[in-house]
């Protein structure tokens, strides 16, 4: 009888620990990020004066933001946060893409000068420009942001995109913590 009671006690404890472990695992398991849309194909011009296509990013996780080189406001803060975030990932883990919303002034030579000024490694970070029409199309139709004639009016949001060119999140560019935690989940 004592053997049976001991056996039942051990079985009860074992089953209880198993159930508690399963509940804890489910609670802390990270859900995949939702798909919020897809980035349709686009082509722009890189700081190195090479055509750059969204197809170049297929198979890679990437983070996109919108800026302009003469921005006195939010851009330096966002770029600084993203540069800090960049250090958390190996170049093959996450690609960074910054698209100028002032294509009239930000030609490739201006983008190169800007990247040199802020010590940006262009092999690991793409700075893109294009015609006003192309940039507006990418901004509004591909990433769903409003466009304005005044480049000073633009978003501080950054976009997390997976290797299938699916948008997985929009985040504040002034706080890199959220995206740092979520990028590895895709």
Image (spheres, rainbow, N blue to C red):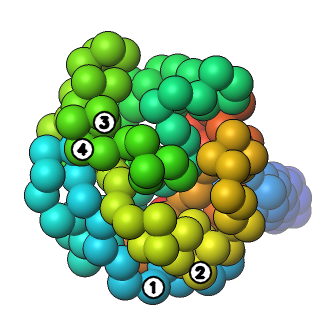
Q: Which residue is mark 1?
A: 40
Report crowding for label 3: few under 14, some 14 to 19, many 20 or more residues within 10 A (C-alpha).
many
Q: Mark 4 against mark 2, which lies toward the viewer?
A: 4
Cα distance, mark 3 to mark 4? 5 Å
Q: Is residue 108 visible?
A: yes
Cα distance, mark 2 to mark 1? 8 Å
Q: Are marks 3 and 4 in contact (CB under 8 Å)?
A: yes
Q: Which residue is mark 4?
A: 108
Q: Are marks 3 and 1 in contact (CB under 8 Å)?
A: no
Q: Which residue is mark 2?
A: 141
Against 46, residue 31 (above or below) is below
Residue at 47% x, 65% y: name it: 132
Q: Is residue 93 left or right of residue 160?
A: left
Q: Are marks 2 and 1 in contact (CB under 8 Å)?
A: yes
Q: Nearer the viewer, residue 22 or 100?
A: 100
Q: Which mark is residue 111?
A: 3
Residue 11: name its quadrant. bottom right
Residue at 37% x, 84% y: name it: 41
């Amino acid at each position: 009888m004592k053997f049976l009671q001991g056996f039942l006690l051990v079985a009860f404890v074992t089953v209880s620990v198993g159930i508690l472990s399963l509940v804890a695992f489910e609670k802390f398991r990270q859900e995949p990020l939702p798909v919020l849309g897809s980035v349709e194909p686009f082509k722009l011009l890189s700081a190195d004066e090479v055509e750059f296509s969204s197809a170049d990013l297929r198979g890679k996780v990437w983070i996109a933001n919108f800026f302009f080189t003469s921005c006195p406001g939010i851009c330096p803060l966002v770029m600084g946060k993203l540069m800090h975030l960049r250090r958390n990932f190996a170049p093959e883990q996450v690609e960074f893409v910054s698209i100028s919303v002032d294509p009239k002034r930000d030609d490739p030579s201006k983008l190169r000068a800007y990247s040199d000024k802020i010590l940006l490694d262009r092999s690991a970070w793409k700075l893109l420009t294009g015609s006003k029409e192309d940039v507006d199309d990418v901004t509004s139709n591909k990433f769903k942001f409003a466009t304005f004639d005044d480049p000073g009016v633009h978003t501080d949001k950054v976009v997390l995109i997976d290797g299938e060119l699916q948008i997985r999140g929009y985040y504040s560019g002034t706080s890199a913590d959220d995206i740092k935690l979520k990028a590895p989940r895709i």
